[in-house]
Amino acid sequence: MPPATAVELTGITKRFPGVIANDDVHIRVAEGEIHAVVGENGAGKSTLMKILYGMLVPDEGQMTVGGEVVSFSSPGEAIDRGIGMVHQHFMLADNLTVMENVILGAEPLRRGAIDLDAARASLEKLGASYGLDIHPDDMVETLEVGERQRVEIIKVLYRGARILILDEPTAVLVPQEVEELFRNLRELKAQGHTIIFIDHKLTEVLAIADTITVLRAGRTVTTVDAGDVTAQELAELMIGGDLPSPSTTTHQIDDHVTLSLAGVTVTGDDQREALSDVDLAIHRGEILGVAGVEGNGQGELIEAILGLRQLAGGSLTFNGEDISEWPVRRRRESGIGYVPEDRHRRGLLLDAPLWENAMLGHQTVEPFAKGSLIDRAGARNATEAIVSRFDIRTPGIDTTARSLSGGNQQKLVIGREIAANPLLLIAAHPTRGIDVGAQAAVWEELRRVRTKGLSVLLISADLHELIGLADRLVVMLGGKVVAELDPADTTPRLLGSHMTGADVENGEPAQ
């Protein structure tokens, strides 16, 4: 006898101006299974999940939850039916603590007042149960991306969700953490939870999912058992082509040092050392990969190079000049490009048109400016060129950034920075949250510009990406560079061991 149906979506259609995001989509999710939904950016996955979670109302079609026809007009109604969602772009209030974010709208009361002790006990119990390390009193604005994700997962579990929608939950995790998360998901499944798992890493989908539904261009292509399909076959179903690989060919690296850090020390927001005596050198035409668990100084390293954070010690030399005291604008105009880790918070003005977004960070130089004034015609022409060169799928450059899929948003940010012809590109998680097709385009562009002499500082949580693209790897732990590795001799597990401070030979914590 087949298992009961937890969720069924039948004939779901959702239209936006000029776009059909979902076109007669059909998905059935059985109770107690882990069901993956895969597809390229723009395939309709996020729209479909927002409909299930009550954030959007479908134009056509029917939804059932537990066998009952439902129609949600808000996430609150979905939560009441036991559905929780962890979004790819987090829904947290920066000015509140972790605990305040988790309990917001579901505060435990005692004699008419919020019972903070009960809330704290619940959070700590949930964190311990599912291996999600959080600190209830931390301000969310101080958290790294990985820590924010843990808060989102705790928030869903706190509300007692029995059906969990997880959008790219492993994007910021090292292999050991992915394994731990998967163990937790399997435990949730064993306890009767139903999990809808959205991911672009097809090997991970095959490792965790029971069933996989493939979407393409807003339509359901097929639903298969995970044991009956390979990653290559999934890629072909998604994009009609081969599974891309970040593997690169070796090439001669120039002796010229584009950027060097000598004894760089900076303090974090808590006034403790976030970077401690860091020495680094990036050569012309080199991709230097930086690996590390989120929160080990990678963010402060980027801010120190860009001039967003003052040095407490040491010096920075860029293209032969000491830039330690230079302001951000001078560094950017001198040839430092930046692809931020969170394109929504730091890379785009979501409600501004593409041609305005194409100027960000470059609005003081040609072709975006004439003297002290914005050159609107130059900006529009430059944006058209970026859209064409980087294959950004959009109706036009007056479209808002918010209306683009995640992959196209990312290509806009990367295209903007590379089109400015920098000497150094800081690329922080450049393929986070984008599909295999967009990944391939980003990887190919990084390989191409490297051969033309661009220096790239690549920071990524995707260890296969780091090993495949980098010419040299360094590992950061506790604000220090603790290892330098040759990608040719490195595996994700070895890299993860260095990142977590484990003894490489014995797998034990380092002394």
Image: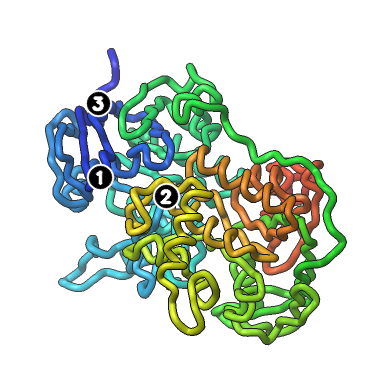
Amino acid marked by disc 2: Gly
Dot 1 alpha-carbon crowd within 10 angstroms: few under 14, some 14 to 19, many 20 or more: few
Amino acid marked by disc 3: Thr
Disc 1 is placed on an element classified as: loop
Judge from the rendering whether residue 250 lies leftward or rightward of residue 185; answer left or right.
right
Q: Is residue 8 visible?
A: no
> In x, y percent, where is residue 183?
50, 38
> In x, y percent, where is residue 209?
45, 30
Q: Nearer the viewer, residue 474 or 375?
A: 375
Which of the 4 image quarters holds residue 505? top right
Disc 2 is placed on an element classified as: helix
Q: Earlier in the sequence, mark 3 or mark 2?
A: 3
Q: Nearer the viewer, residue 267 or 384?
A: 384
- On screen, 339 above or below 83? below
Q: Earlier in the sequence, mark 2 or mark 1?
A: 1
Cα distance, mark 2 to mark 1? Answer: 17 Å
Disc 3 is placed on an element classified as: strand
Please tell me which residue is depicted at 24% across the width and 41% down the height of the picture: 52
Which residue does the numbered mark 3 point to in the structure image?
5
Which residue does the numbered mark 1 point to in the structure image?
18
> In x, y percent, where is residue 483?
79, 57
